[in-house]
Image (spheres, rainbow, N blue to C red):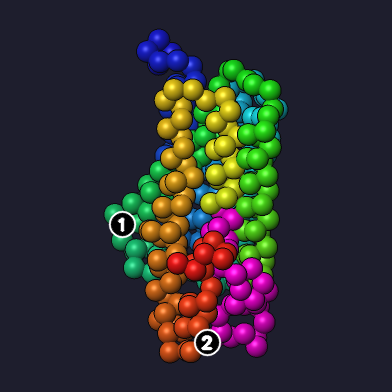
Amino acid sequence: MGSSMSRPTANLVRCAALDLGIQWTMFAVAATLKTEKFYDLVGSGTFALLAVQSLRWGGHYHLRQKVQTGMVVTWGLRLGGHLFSRVMAAGGDSRFNKVRGNPKVFFMYWTVQALWILATLLPTLILNLEKKDKVIGIRDYIGWGLWGAGFLIETLADRQKSVFRADPDNAGKFIDSGLWSVSRHPNYLGEILLWSGMYLSASSVMSGWQHVSVISPFFVWFLLTRVSGIPILERQGMKRYGSDPRYLEYLKNVPVLFPFFKK
């Protein structure tokens, strides 16, 4: 492999292989047990593992690389723990009601997760496997600031929703308080911001084809706003609360994603 491609490229292929290997192995376990309860936990854990492993394979440990890796690990541990505790409390994930007993479709879910991880983490992998380094500059500080803001928004939004749902008085109600009063999906807003920030900082050392990793924040945005996130939740919301005038007013007055942008 080393004779036909550069070491960073070879290690990038190794990261992709490790990613697929983990998802497919855990699919076999999940399919055998017919459970999806650790699906999100494995996904988040793979993010953290690949970030750390790419740093080790790169072998340079520049400050920018260590900060970026720490951000991914922090995000992965926080989100993985949150999603795992939520699915355990609920007893399952409704997304898998029709697929956990269908191995072929279930396999596709795990494969798509592998592709999601690779596409989203690409800027970090390229950064960690890159030998060259540059002095920390304004692009890094803006990127890290975006990550910090996104992480804070996502964490706070998840916390507010968890507290809301834990209150028996809110049974059958929709959340419209806190961050949820200015955005219908503030947790997704945070997700988009933090991955955008990580690409921005990582791009400081990129050149040529490496800039294709800009796909990361755009892929996250596309996935959340057009595929598996907002469209599904908006349909579920209408099904549950569509006859409630307060909910219809909420839809009218609160932006889908970005505060102050109603359309």
**For the residues carrying marks 1 and 2, which lies nearer the camera in this image?**
2
As drawn, is 119 to the left or to the right of 143? left
Q: Residue at x 62, y 65 (%)?
A: 158
Image coordinates of residue 237 in percent, x first then y, are 45, 77
Q: Residue at x 44, y 22 (%)?
A: 208
Determine the secondary structure under disc 1: helix
Image coordinates of residue 86 in percent, x first then y, are 58, 67
Image coordinates of residue 170 in percent, x first then y, are 62, 85
Q: As shown in the figure, which amino acid type bears the numbered disc 2?
A: Arg
Query: Label 2 near label 1: C-beta < 8 Å?
Result: no
Report the magenta residues as a range.
Answer: 162-191
Of pointers 1 and 2, the one earlier in the residue sequence = 1
Residue 91 drawn above or below residue 8: below
Please give the residue where the numbered disc 2 appears in the rendered image. Answer: 246
- Mark 1, Cα crowd under 10 Å, few <14 / some 14-19 / many 20+, is some
Residue 237 drawn above or below residue 22: below
Q: Residue at x 60, y 70 (%)?
A: 182
Helix, strand or loop: magenta stretch = helix
In the picture, the quarter occupied by the N terminus is: top left
Determine the secondary structure under disc 2: helix
Residue 213 drawn above or below residue 176: above
Magenta includes 165? yes
What label does residue 227 carry, if any? none
What label does residue 105 carry, if any? 1
As drawn, is 156 to the left or to the right of 187? right
